[in-house]
Image (tube, rainbow, N blue to C red):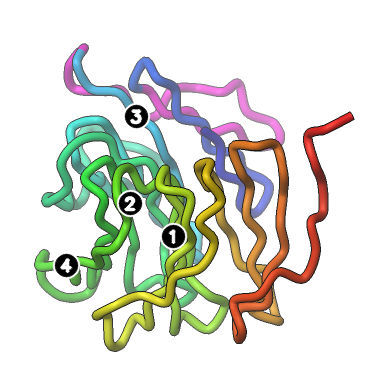
Amino acid sequence: MTEVLAGKVAVVTGAGAMRIHPAVSDGRTLIRRAGKAIYFRSVAYSPDGRWVAIGSNDGLVRIWGAEGGHRPLRVLRGHRGMVWSAVFSPDGRRLASAADDGTVRIWDLVGDDNPVVLRGHQGFVWSVAFSPDGEWVAASGKDGTIRLWRTSVGGEPVTFGDFGTSVEGIAFLPGDGRLVTTHGDGTIRLWRCDACAPVDRLITGED
């Protein structure tokens, strides 16, 4: 998986390494896994470019300095199974993660390690995203639904979709709060977040 920020590309590999590729870099390895059983899956830069969050198959999210190091600066514990997605909030003060255990967790990076646990998905949660204002978290999963929670409240999510196929990726468009989702049936869909109604099917996998 890759993440791009300010001319740098962070790449994590299934073999458990992270490389940073600046425009004139040799792609040196900055982080390497501690053991052969650890596999990195997701990577995200903080908005200020100082930190990198990496999710892995041991249920942990490790936060490193963007220039690497021998040890992570912080380890977030609580998920079970693969952490498929981990993203920083727009202000960099929180991190949302999604995993095999069917939960989304919101971590306070300036506070303690007790996350807000958001439930609702049945099965793996593939992807998670913050809204541009940081007030909402959206997640997509194997159960074919899209779920939204207000970050200040948590509780029961707004749920829409139920496509009969997994919703594999989700992201907010900058500025207007619309959502774009990718689906196991080869489609990409655009949504109005206020009504959770589809605006358009942008791309289909059909010829």
Q: Secondary structure at mark 4?
A: loop
Quadrant of the rendered image containing residue 46: bottom left
Res 102 label: none
Q: Secondary structure at mark 3?
A: strand
Mark nearer the N terminus (4 vs 1): 4
Q: Position of residue 91 (x, y in %)?
A: 44, 77
Gap in Å between the C-alphas at discs 2 and 3? 14 Å
Instruction: Examine the rendered structure and indicate whether residue 171 appears above or below residue 53.
Output: below
Mark nearer the N terminus (2 vs 4): 2
Q: Dot 2 surroundings within 10 Å: few (below 14), some, or many (20 or more)?
A: many
Instruction: Reply yes or no: does residue 28 show up in magenta.
Output: yes
Residue 190 in sight in this render = yes
Residue behind mark 2: 98
Instruction: Examine the rendered structure and indicate whether residue 155 appears above or below residue 97.
Output: below
Q: Secondary structure at mark 1?
A: strand
Gap in Å between the C-alphas at discs 1 and 2? 8 Å
Res 115 label: 4
Residue 66 in sight in this render = no
Please tell me which residue is depicted at 25% across the width and 56% down the height of the picture: 103
Q: Position of residue 175 (x, y in %)?
A: 70, 80
Amino acid marked by disc 4? Pro
Marks 1 and 2: CB-CB under 8 Å? yes
Mark nearer the N terminus (3 vs 4): 3
Please tell me which residue is depicted at 38% across the width and 23% down the height of the picture: 17
Residue behind mark 3: 40
Q: Position of residue 83 (x, y in %)?
A: 30, 41
